[in-house]
Image (cartoon, rainbow, N blue to C red):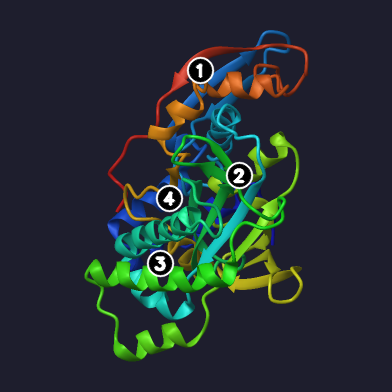
Amino acid sequence: MVRNKNAIAHIINGQWSNVIANCNTYQLRMLHAVRSCRTSALGGQLYQCNSCCRHHIRYNSCRNRHCPQCQNTQKERWILARQAQLIDTTYYHVVFTIPHVLNSLCKSNQRIMYACLLRSTWDTLNTFGWNKKYLGAQIGATTVLHTWGSNLSYHPHVHCMVPGGGVTLKNKWKQVKGNGKYLFNAKAMSIVFRAKYIAAITKAGILIPQKLKHDLYKKPWVVYAKPSYGNRETLIKYLARYAYKTAITHHRIISYSERSVSFKYKDYRHKNLIKIMTLSSWEFVRRFTQHILPKGFCRIRHYGILNGSWKSKIFTNASVKKKDWKEIWEDKGLEINKCPHCKKGILILKEEIQPKRGPPCK
């Protein structure tokens, strides 16, 4: 049993015969990208230190949004863009969750169910924003779809970051009531959200059996709403953590072998205790695979005053120069071109390493 910073790729490699037998072609492409990330399969660059003359190879990343190794640079770019688009107000973290009884419908109609989930989430927030009892203004929201629980179970839900105010019809800013501790009534939002979501999926052509519909109305749906504390920098990082989070990261994996995988997870039902779960290696890959989103599906969306059409009006000087990955990390104090061996020399590019050529992944 060993720990490895590229553990997920090794686990997928070890179960590749099962992956071929049980996954569709799109899932195969995504998993192949993850297992090939930062390996010779994708090519790279050969560098030589001008001091100790050692050679160093940097392999290319797969840039896949499901890959735990490829989200950090994108996250930093997103943070830079949000720094110029942050309203000076309290932000609220709102989570909309659908019941587990809808899981089977979600798995078989992912694109429709996920799109309706994101849209119903915004429709609910927008309804309460325009309600004069709560605010009476155009609010905004950044919504992020997550499909996983901490233990890699299937659990579709939407995280929202909502500024605590909006723009009135007279084009003036209006703050929500509650002195930064309260956005909208969570219980009331859950009732409206349930009605809007069921109506949306029905309109989209999803047939809901009568017994299932009865179960959907039997229990209240969970809506969580709390203010996000911290300064501007903390808030932006908080936003980015949810925007570019993957189903699981390498640091949570404690050990793995050909037979089993052990990883840490947070048990939200028991006071957020950190526990350890052990699954068979194929079950781990199967759970990881079920969180691959439909092709081209956008899981991060901006609505209301945070939508593109509004941003140009509210954030007049919000344009940010796009930086390449080296500039981003050098600005954070990392010396990208310093030799990792002697810590003195500079790495000089010697040649490009071409990716391995061969038959396409089956």
Q: Which residue is mark 3?
A: 18
| 10 Å crowding of disc 1: few (<14), some (14-19), many (20+) | few
- Which residue is painted at 48% across and 27% down in the image? 44
**Quadrant in which residue 334 is drawn:** top right
Q: Which comes sooner in the sequence, label 1 or label 3?
A: 3
Labels 4 and 1: the sequence-earlier one: 4
Vertical placement of residue 184 versus 321, above or below: below
Residue named by callout 1: 321
Q: Badge 4 is on which residue?
A: 299
Secondary-structure class at tag 3 = helix
Q: Are marks 4 and 1 in contact (CB under 8 Å)?
A: no
What kind of residue is marked 4?
Arg
Res. 154 in view:
no
- C-alpha gap between disc 2 and disc 3: 36 Å
**Mark 3 closeness class: few <14, some 14–19, many ≥20 residues within 10 Å:** some
**Disc 4 residue crowd, few under 14, some 14–19, many 20+, Cα 10 Å:** some
Q: Is residue 178 left or right of residue 210?
A: right
The percent coordinates of residue 276 (x first, y second) are: 71, 70
Q: Is residue 272 visible?
A: yes
Q: CA distance from mark 2 to mark 1?
A: 20 Å
The location of residue 176, given as percent across then percent down, is 61, 50
* Residue 109 falls left or right of residue 17: left
Quarter containing the N terminus: bottom right
- In this picture, residue 325 sits left or right of residue 199: right
Kindly identify the amino acid type of the residue bearing the numbered disc 3.
Asn
Q: Residues within 10 Å of mark 2 (few under 14, many from 20)?
A: many
Measure the alpha-carbon separation of dots 4 and 3. Answer: 28 Å
| Disc on res. 239 | 2
> Where is residue 131 drawn, in percent x and y?
48, 58
**Kind of residue indicated by mark 1:** Lys
Which mark identifies residue 155? none
